Image (cartoon, rainbow, N blue to C red):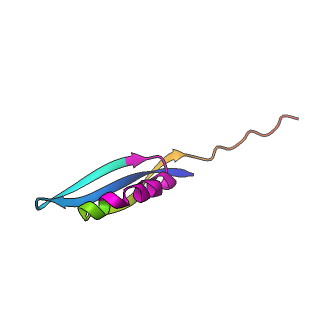
Amino acid sequence: MEFFYIFTISYTLAGSPLDIHMPLQNAEQCQIAIRANEGLAEALNADLFCENTGVLSKSIRPKLRPTN
């Protein structure tokens, strides 16, 4: 089973905390987003993280038994 994840960039600009949230299909996409934005995180002194929403994006579906 796969769950939706929220990719978050959290940083401070002019003393105000800001968060950017992006929904993604699964944990793998979220990890790719973190790696792709490491340079931005260093430039902004930001935190990058993924959070599991607990909402299914894809589930394992049972297969029907053969009729023969």
The residue under the point 84% across, 34% down is 67
The residue under the point 31% across, 50% down is 21
**9 or 63: nearer the eye?**
9
**How many numbered marks appear?**
0
Left or right, 4 with respect to 16, comes to right
The residue under the point 72% across, 41% down is 63
**In magenta segment, residue 55:** no
> Horizontal and vertical percent for residue 18?
20, 55
**In magenta segment, residue 36:** yes
**47 or 25: nearer the eye?**
47
> Horizontal and vertical percent for residue 2?
54, 51
The stretch in magenta equals: 23-40
> Horizontal and vertical percent for residue 25?
47, 46
> Horizontal and vertical percent for residue 9?
30, 57
Identity of the residue furthest to the right in this view? 68
Left or right, 15 with respect to 61, comes to left
Main secondary structure type of the part rendered in magenta: helix
The residue under the point 46% across, 58% down is 31
Identity of the residue furthest to the left in this view? 14
Which picture quadrant has residue 58?
A: top right
**41 or 68: nearer the eye?**
41
Identity of the residue furthest to the top in this view? 67
Identify the image quadrant of the C terminus: top right
